[in-house]
Amino acid sequence: MELPERDGDGYLTDMNAWTPEIGAAMAEQDGIELDDTRWAHIMKAREYYDENSVVPPIRKFAKFAGEDQKEMFKLWLTGPMKPITKYGGLPKPTGCV
């Protein structure tokens, strides 16, 4: 699959180009496996963005998603919002990631 144009951090330059298949291909290219839990986080972040037109900070997102923030950090092995938004075709988070 040919991926749409991405910026230097790997985010899509046109978030309207995102599809689940593109998100999965981006993750695969980066060596990340998107299991059901990670996909649930991505889709929940897209839901939040659709409702609020902003990427939430991790604390607010964990509460919205009904997830334990510490467990999210363990699962993603990094600040969770960066890969969640990246593979979800959303804008870069503005908070600490």
Image: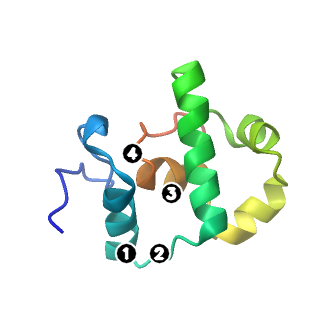
- Amino acid carrying label 2: it is Ile
Residue at (63, 55) in percent of width and height:
40
| N-term-proximal mark, 1 vs 3 | 1
State the CA–CA distance, disc 4 to disc 3.
10 Å
| N-term-proximal mark, 4 vs 1 | 1
Residue at (69, 70) in percent of width and height:
75
From the image, tell me which residue sits under label 2. 32
Disc 1 element = helix
| N-term-proximal mark, 4 vs 3 | 3
Residue 83 tag number:
3
Disc 2 element = loop
Q: Residues within 10 Å of mark 4 (few under 14, many from 20)?
A: many
Marks 1 and 2: in contact by CB < 8 Å?
Answer: yes
- Amino acid carrying label 3: it is Pro
Marks 1 and 4: in contact by CB < 8 Å?
Answer: no
Residue at (39, 65) in percent of width and height:
24
Marks 2 and 3: in contact by CB < 8 Å?
Answer: yes
